[in-house]
């Protein structure tokens, strides 16, 4: 039986109060939020634990202080069946964070519960699971867990690699941990003597933090700029972030650290773990972030597609937006493709591109095609700012994938003008509309290939 991933830290209860707003109060310039729906989820270290559990078949154990109040009881209910809880006795009340949200935007946050919990002794069971874990993730939220001497002693004695996600009000990481994952602002607070915000400054701060904390490596997360990984000497590694349109960034840091810890538990080296963390965090945000963690329990859309496309479609539909899709081989991307894709994106609130698999292209274009593999074609398309997701299908036509995605609009280039698109009948099943876009004349992959042979 494989050893578990153990998450150690401060468990919070997160609450989203989600409603709509169409007017301001008469006595102050603040919105009136109506038709409010209450959504509860684990927060802090508890969120990191459920994120990790959703991404692995490995057992996930949460070691966290828990009081005996109503908030703690609700946390136990939310964690049941997802992670194994090993509580540390505590007083001070469960920390509760309530976000008041209008659609995808927060307008206020209300925090309650004592800022620092008073912990009892670390139970023997907790010390044992930390010691024997495949990897340990420390999710510090500044409530005193990581400062407790017996907790620090247990972490120092862990046999597996330790990933430490720090907090401005938390304790310094235990010396010798494998990886610490501050964000850029946290790194700047700990190393304030380094000026600037560029990569050189971030790299210098990371080196300073490794020396200051006595740890193996520091990965500074920089949002859209990606993550910088330093080992304290030599050139740092920068892992670019995957572009994400929209999404709730709440929980992105937890998802990054959780994925990195899981990768280390599976034997990855530190650089591989950081790359896995960046990819997972981007996908997590694209699927809706922490606010969508329990979407399966709340009217999840009937979509079976690639994870990126699923998250994009669910988010757009939840906001009442229009889903646009287009498709083709997209072998040797050229200006005609770019013009069509840009125009298609302008028809709605997201664009999903459906591309033929390599086998499908061969059946349609002949044994010499495609010139570019499906994986590389998808990467190129995903790099375009007006493409939100890419789905690869293996059939000769996109009819089956369209039936799964059910876009509101299906757009094709103008070389189909005046013709009945073969996908039109499929779209009629759910009220979708097939349209033809203006075609940029003189550009085609086949013509490019023929000219290259001359």
Image (cartoon, rainbow, N blue to C red):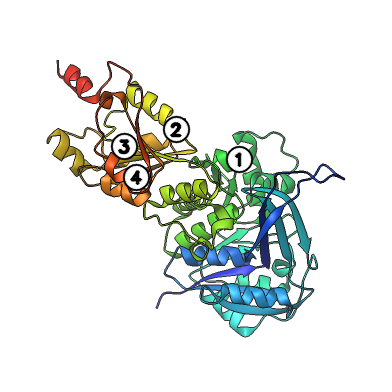
244 vs 19, left or right, is: left
Judge whether residue 62 can be spotted in this image: no
Q: How far apart are the two marked residues, 1 and 2, measured between alpha carbons?
A: 37 Å
Depth order, front residue of 43/9: 43
197 vs 353, left or right, is: right
Mark 1 near mark 4, Cβ–Cβ under 8 Å? no
Camera-side mark, 1 or 3: 3
Q: Which residue position holds label 2?
A: 345
Camera-side mark, 4 or 3: 3
345 vs 210, left or right, is: left
Are there few (<14), some (14-19), or many (20+) residues within 10 Å of tag 4? Answer: many
Q: Which residue is pictured at 27% across the width and 49% down the height?
A: 400
On the image, which quarter does residue 330 sit in? top left
First-in-chain label (1 vs 4): 1
Q: Position of residue 52 (x, y in %)?
A: 51, 64
In this rendering, the answer to whether 115 lies above or below 23 is: below
Depth order, front residue of 58/273: 58
Mark 4 near mark 3, Cβ–Cβ under 8 Å? no
Q: How far apart are the two marked residues, 1 and 3, measured between alpha carbons?
A: 42 Å
User: In this view, which residue lies farthest toward the bottom?
Assistant: 124
Q: Which residue position holds label 1?
A: 203
User: Element type at marker 4?
Assistant: strand
User: Element type at marker 3?
Assistant: strand
Q: Which residue position holds label 3?
A: 327
First-in-chain label (4 vs 2): 2
Q: Which residue position holds label 4?
A: 391
Mark 1 near mark 2, Cβ–Cβ under 8 Å? no
First-in-chain label (4 vs 3): 3
**Quarter of the figure that contains the C terminus:** top left
Q: Position of residue 88 (x, y in %)?
A: 68, 78
Are there few (<14), some (14-19), or many (20+) residues within 10 Å of tag 3? Answer: many
Q: Which residue is pictured at 41% across the width and 42% down the height?
A: 408
């Amino acid at each position: 039986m494989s050893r578990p991933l153990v998450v150690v830290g401060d468990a919070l209860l997160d609450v989203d109060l989600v409603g709509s707003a169409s007017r301001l109060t008469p006595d102050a310039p603040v919105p009136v939020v109506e038709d409010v729906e209450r959504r509860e989820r684990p927060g802090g270290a508890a969120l990191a634990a459920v994120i990790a559990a959703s991404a692995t078949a490995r057992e996930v154990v949460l070691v966290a202080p828990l009081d005996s109040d109503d908030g703690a009881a609700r946390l136990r209910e939310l964690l049941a069946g997802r992670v194994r809880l090993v509580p540390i006795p505590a007083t001070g009340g469960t920390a509760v964070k309530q976000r008041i949200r209008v659609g995808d935007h927060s307008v206020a946050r209300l925090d309650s519960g004592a800022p620092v919990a008073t912990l009892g002794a670390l139970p023997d069971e907790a010390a044992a699971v930390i010691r024997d874990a495949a990897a340990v993730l420390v999710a510090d939220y500044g409530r005193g867990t990581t400062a407790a001497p017996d907790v620090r002693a247990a972490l120092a004695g862990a046999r597996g690699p330790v990933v430490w996600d720090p907090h401005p009000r938390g304790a310094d990481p235990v010396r010798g941990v494998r990886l610490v994952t501050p964000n850029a602002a946290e790194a700047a607070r700990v190393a304030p003597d380094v000026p600037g915000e560029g990569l050189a400054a971030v790299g210098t701060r990371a080196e300073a933090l490794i020396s200051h904390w006595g740890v193996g490596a520091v990965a500074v997360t920089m949002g859209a700029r990606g993550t910088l990984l330093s080992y304290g000497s030599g050139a740092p590694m920068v892992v670019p972030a995957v572009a994400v349109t929209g999404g709730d960034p709440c929980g992105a840091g937890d998802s990054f650290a959780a994925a990195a810890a899981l990768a280390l538990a599976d034997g990855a080296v530190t650089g591989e773990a950081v790359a896995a963390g960046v990819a997972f965090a981007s996908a997590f945000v694209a699927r809706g972030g922490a606010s969508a963690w329990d979407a399966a329990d709340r009217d999840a859309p009937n979509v079976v597609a690639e994870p990126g496309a699923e998250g994009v479609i669910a988010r757009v539909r939840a906001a009442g937006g229009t889903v646009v899709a287009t498709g083709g081989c997209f072998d040797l991307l050229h200006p005609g493709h770019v013009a069509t894709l840009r125009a298609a994106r302008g028809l709605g609130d997201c664009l999903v591109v459906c591309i033929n698999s390599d086998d499908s292209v061969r059946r349609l274009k002949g044994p010499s095609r495609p010139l570019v593999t499906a994986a590389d074609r998808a990467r190129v398309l995903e790099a375009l700012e007006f493409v939100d997701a890419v789905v690869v299908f293996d059939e000769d036509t996109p009819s089956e994938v369209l039936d799964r995605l059910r876009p509101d609009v299906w757009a094709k280039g103008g070389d189909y003008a005046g013709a009945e698109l073969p996908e039109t009948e499929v779209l009629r099943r759910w009220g979708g509309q097939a349209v033809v876009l203006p075609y940029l004349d003189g550009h085609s992959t086949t013509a490019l290939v023929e000219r290259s042979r001359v």
